[in-house]
């Protein structure tokens, strides 16, 4: 992808769209394309943070270990999303592990170049603060779901949220990742999914499932 095409893609990103055409071209020249295979780790928790990533295509999961060391998925990021930015603000190590759950193409921007964009463009800084606030709200909502919803409700809400974000009824998520996302054992999640499939709410495939009855899933979400 040449600099002009990268700049055109940056124009579609909420964070970089506020830049001038010349600024986007300058940034594009400093971004490096990266490709991650399915299940490849982009970076581990506690790694040094030197780059921020903008997803061109694909999906990654953001995860942390719980007190027992079990993986807990806290977010999914898709095309157009930025990830890896948090540690760049305080020069701390990575706070989470990021793994590609599909073949993923991304653009990497070094810390100094990323910070120079924000420092020179108040609109970009405001949008970055908005993205950080969105991250905090999403984390708060995830905790509320874990506390107030039963397992069936958490699974149903997770499937609907992912479907809404991707704009398709196909959810590209393994049952293991789904279990990590809703904070439950895989065998328990498998039972819930089997029940949903028996009620014709979903159709289970290999490494994905399709939502067949959204209203049935919505009725399972009871706070």
Image (spheres, helix red, strand yellow):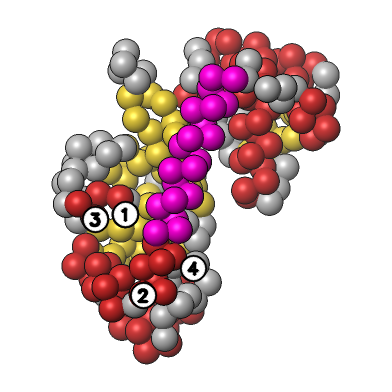
Neighbourhood count class around disc 3 (C-alpha, 10 Å): few under 14, some 14–19, many 20 upward: few
Tell which tag, 2 or 4, sits nearer the viewer. Answer: 2
Question: Residue most toward the bottom?
Answer: 22
Who's the residue at 30% across and 50% down the image? 86
- Work out whether 196 lies above or below 211: above
Quarter of the C terminus within the rendering: top right
Who's the residue at 64% across and 39% down the image? 161
Give the secondary structure at mark 2.
helix
Who's the residue at 31% across and 54% down the image? 85
Q: Quadrant of residue 70?
A: top left
Give how far apart the Cα atoms at labels 1 and 4 are.
15 Å
Would you say 194 lies left or right of 138 here?
right
The one of 207 and 182 positioned closer to us in this rendering:
182
**Mark closest to the chain's N terminus, 1 or 4:** 4
Residue 122 numbered mark, or none: 2
Q: Quadrant of residue 160?
A: top right
Neighbourhood count class around disc 4 (C-alpha, 10 Å): few under 14, some 14–19, many 20 upward: some
Give the secondary structure at mark 3.
helix
**Mark closest to the chain's N terminus, 1 or 2:** 1
Give how far apart the Cα atoms at labels 3 and 2 are.
16 Å
Provide the residue designation for mark 1: 85
Tell which tag, 3 or 1, sits nearer the viewer. Answer: 3
Residue 142 seen in the current view: yes
Residue 130, x across and y down, in percent? 45, 58
**Mark closest to the chain's N terminus, 3 or 2:** 3
Would you say 219 lies left or right of 52 here?
right
The one of 173 and 205 positioned closer to us in this rendering:
173
């Amino acid at each position: 992808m040449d600099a002009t095409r990268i700049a055109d893609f940056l124009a579609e990103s909420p964070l970089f769209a506020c830049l001038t055409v010349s600024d986007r071209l300058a940034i594009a020249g400093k971004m490096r394309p990266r490709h991650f295979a399915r299940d490849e780790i982009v970076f581990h928790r506690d790694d040094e943070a030197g780059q921020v990533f903008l997803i061109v295509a694909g999906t990654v999961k953001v995860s942390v270990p719980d007190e027992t060391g079990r993986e807990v998925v806290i977010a999914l990021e898709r095309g157009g999303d930025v990830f890896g930015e948090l540690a760049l603000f305080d020069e701390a190590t990575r706070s989470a592990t990021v793994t590609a759950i599909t073949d993923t193409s991304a653009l990497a921007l070094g810390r100094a170049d990323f910070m120079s964009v924000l420092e020179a463009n108040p609109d970009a800084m405001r949008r970055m603060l908005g993205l950080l606030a969105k991250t905090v709200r999403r984390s708060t909502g995830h905790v509320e779901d874990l506390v107030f919803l039963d397992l069936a409700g958490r699974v149903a809400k997770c499937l609907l949220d992912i479907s809404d974000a991707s704009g398709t009824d196909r959810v590209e998520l393994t049952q293991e990742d789904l279990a990590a996302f809703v904070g439950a054992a895989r065998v328990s999640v498998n039972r819930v999914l089997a029940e949903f499939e028996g009620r014709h709410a979903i159709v289970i495939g290999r490494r994905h499932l399709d939502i067949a009855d959204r209203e049935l899933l919505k009725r399972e979400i009871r706070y």
